[in-house]
Structure formats: C-alpha cells, structure tokens
Image (cartoon, rainbow, N blue to C red):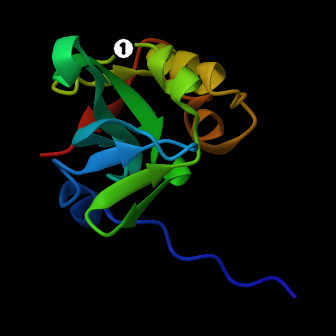
C-alpha cells in the first residue's frame, strides 16, 4: 500500500528556509538558501535559490555562484535543507541570479541539467508557455 505523499511546501514555508544550510545526497553541505523562485502565473514554489559554498584556504567558507534546485527535490529538517541531488550535479548547474526572474528557456535548461525532460515536473508545467516569457519570479 502506498503512503500518501506530503503536500508540497508553500511559498511562505520555503521563504522561512532562507539562510539554512543545504546538504546534498551524500550528506555534505553545499551552500545556503538565499531565496525561492515561484511560478509567475500561480505563485507556487518552483525552485530553491542556493548560493553554493566551498572550503577555501585554511578551511574558510567561500561563496560561489547561485543555482536553482527543484523544490520537489528538497526537504526541510532541523534547521537545514536536504536535497536528493548530488554535489557534482549542483556544482555544475547553470548559475542564476536570485534577484532576477527566470525565462522559460532558462528553466528548461536547468531542468535538462538535472535530467528532467519537458514531459516531467516543472518543465512540463512551462513547456507550452510562450518562448521568452518570464515563468518564475523571485519570491518576495
């Protein structure tokens, strides 16, 4: 018997994750939540904006580029966020500006990077929208 899945996190809940560390599939911390992108039409959370971090000289944390992680691949737990994605996929993901909207083509590129084709999940939601349209905006 299948257990019912938990309802997706709301935009308000995800906004409360700002500043949380993000752990990847293997358990290593990869960065911090800086915000969320929500669907431009219905306001549903679509992507978590994460500023990647790495250890620099003498173990100091250094901030890297920001990337978008599918909200569906994330879960909150004890002041942290866990993602089912691996560190290599996250570190090689297309960079995003967490303060600027995402266009349809950018979202499709991000989805393709994570192996999500246009028939699944978020890419399927936006595939029919006009080319060049804004499909996700930063959550305020």
- In the image, what residue occupies the spot 16% across and 23% down? 60
Residue 47 lies in quadrant: top left
Q: Which residue is mark 1?
A: 95
Q: Nearer the viewer, residue 123 or 33?
A: 33
Q: Position of residue 123 (x, y in %)?
A: 61, 33
- Of all residues, the one furthest to the bottom in this rendering is 1
Residue 11 lies in quadrant: bottom left
- In the image, what residue occupies the spot 55% across and 77% down? 6
Q: Nearer the viewer, residue 64 or 3?
A: 64
Give the side of residue 42 with respect to residue 17, left or right: right
Q: Position of residue 56 (x, y in %)?
A: 23, 14
- Of all residues, the one furthest to the right in this rendering is 1
- In the image, what residue occupies the spot 81% across and 82% down? 2
Question: Which quadrant of the rendered structure holds the N terminus?
Answer: bottom right
Mark 1, other Cα within 10 Å: few <14 / some 14–19 / many ≥20: some
Q: Nearer the viewer, residue 130 or 49?
A: 49
Give the side of residue 62 with respect to residue 120, left or right: left
Give the side of residue 54 with respect to residue 99, left or right: right
Total marks placed: 1
Vertically, is 30 above or below 26? above
Q: Is residue 20 visible?
A: yes
- In the image, what residue occupies the spot 57% across and 40% down? 122
Vertically, is 54 above or below 31? above
Q: Secondary structure at mark 1?
A: loop
Q: Is residue 41 visible?
A: no
- Of all residues, the one furthest to the front in this rendering is 58
Q: Position of residue 24 (x, y in %)?
A: 49, 41
């Amino acid at each position: 018997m299948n257990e019912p899945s938990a309802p997706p996190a709301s935009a308000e809940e995800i906004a409360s994750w700002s500043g949380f560390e993000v752990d990847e599939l293997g358990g290593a911390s990869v960065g911090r939540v800086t915000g969320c992108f929500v669907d431009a039409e219905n306001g549903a959370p679509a992507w978590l904006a994460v500023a990647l971090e790495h250890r620099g000289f003498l173990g100091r944390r250094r901030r890297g580029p920001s990337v978008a992680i599918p909200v569906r691949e994330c879960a909150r737990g004890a002041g942290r966020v866990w993602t089912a994605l691996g560190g290599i996929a996250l570190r090689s993901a297309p960079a995003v500006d967490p303060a600027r909207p995402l266009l349809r083509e950018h979202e499709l590129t991000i989805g393709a990077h994570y192996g999500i084709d246009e028939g699944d999940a978020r890419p399927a939601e936006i595939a029919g929208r006009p080319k060049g349209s804004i499909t996700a905006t930063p959550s305020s």
